[in-house]
Image (cartoon, rainbow, N blue to C red):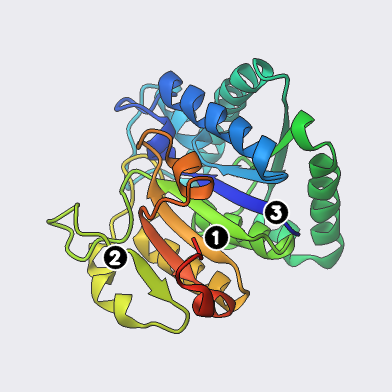
């Protein structure tokens, strides 16, 4: 779909040190999204955070002993807080939050896959009035059919609507050349480039989420094969979305698909 961008927001971006919603970050991200909706017609949001918010409600911290049943309970509780935050700030812009909870099975089964796509397309038809917001339905997802994390889900949605780009908002500023030097970012990875294998060692899951850089690299490479570019940037940087997508500032890491390589000077 022309003029379409998927924005994926990681748990650590929108939560504070206690795992609770970070009000200021939510406000800033929604304000940027509304600016983008006026300039880029089709915006789809994929958000994490429900499990962390639910866990915080119970005063728990993430633990290796946490069971699937624990995560399902936390997700069922935290999803209220997650969507309340988006609805609260979107309402101030006269925009309606459209919640779409899916499992991996919904995107593997053809009939359900079509239903998900139909819902997205209908929500996008309203343009300024509706923002589709996806999350994995962790409250019912089984261990065998869970996404590795919402990076994978965002990649699936990007392929499903043939988006122009996926922007992954992380707590880090991109793929690091050396985990000890957070200022040394791999700015560009071109289609078929295997050089980032040396950076896989930086893999660490986030404090509250379940994702890591390895999954982001895998998603970026996969989407490059489908001619969709992927950006990894820090969601905590001021105006990061508008700087990246409107001002075309070169920030973070971009995975450049094959069809864009000849346009290196202008491709995001």
The relative height of residue 92 versus residue 100 in the rendered view (above or below) is above
- Residue 186 marker: 2
Label 3 sits on residue: 3
Compute the Cα span from label 2 to label 1.
21 Å
Q: Pick whichever, 229 or 137, lies toward us.
A: 229
Q: Earlier in the sequence, mark 2 or mark 3?
A: 3
10 Å neighbourhood of mark 3: few (<14), some, or many (≥20)? few
Q: Residue at image x 53%, y 45%? A: 246
10 Å neighbourhood of mark 1: few (<14), some, or many (≥20)? some
Element carrying mark 2? loop
Q: Residue at image x 59%, y 61%? A: 155
Q: Give the percent coordinates (x, y) of residue 94.
A: 73, 19
Q: Is residue 243 left or right of residue 120?
A: left
Residue 18, quarter of the rendered image: top left
Q: Residue at image x 78%, y 29%? A: 129
Q: Pick whichever, 124 or 188, lies toward us.
A: 188
């Amino acid at each position: 779909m022309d003029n379409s961008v998927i924005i994926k927001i990681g748990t650590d971006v929108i939560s504070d040190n206690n795992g609770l919603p970070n009000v200021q970050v939510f406000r800033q991200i929604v304000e940027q999204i509304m600016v983008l909706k006026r300039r880029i017609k089709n915006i789809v949001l994929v958000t994490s955070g429900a499990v962390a918010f639910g866990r915080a409600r119970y005063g728990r911290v993430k633990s290796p002993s946490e069971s699937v049943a624990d995560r399902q309970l936390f997700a069922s509780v935290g999803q209220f807080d997650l969507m309340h935050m988006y609805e609260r700030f979107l309402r101030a812009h006269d925009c309606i939050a459209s919640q779409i909870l899916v499992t991996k099975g919904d995107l593997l089964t053809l009939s359900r896959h079509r239903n998900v796509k139909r819902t997205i397309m209908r929500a996008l038809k309203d343009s300024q009035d509706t923002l589709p917001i996806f999350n994995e339905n962790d409250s019912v997802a089984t261990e065998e059919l869970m996404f590795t994390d919402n990076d994978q889900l965002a990649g699936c949605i990007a392929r499903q609507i043939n988006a122009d780009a996926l922007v992954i908002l992380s707590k880090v500023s991109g793929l690091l050349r050396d985990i000890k030097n957070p200022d040394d970012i791999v700015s560009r990875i071109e289609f078929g480039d295997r050089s980032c294998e040396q950076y896989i060692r930086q893999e660490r899951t986030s404090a509250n989420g379940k994702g890591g850089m390895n999954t982001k690299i895998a998603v970026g490479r996969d989407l490059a094969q489908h001619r969709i570019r992927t950006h990894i940037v820090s969601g905590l940087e001021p105006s990061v979305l508008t700087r990246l997508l409107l001002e075309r500032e070169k920030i973070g890491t971009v995975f450049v698909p094959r069809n864009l390589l000849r346009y290196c000077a202008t491709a995001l």
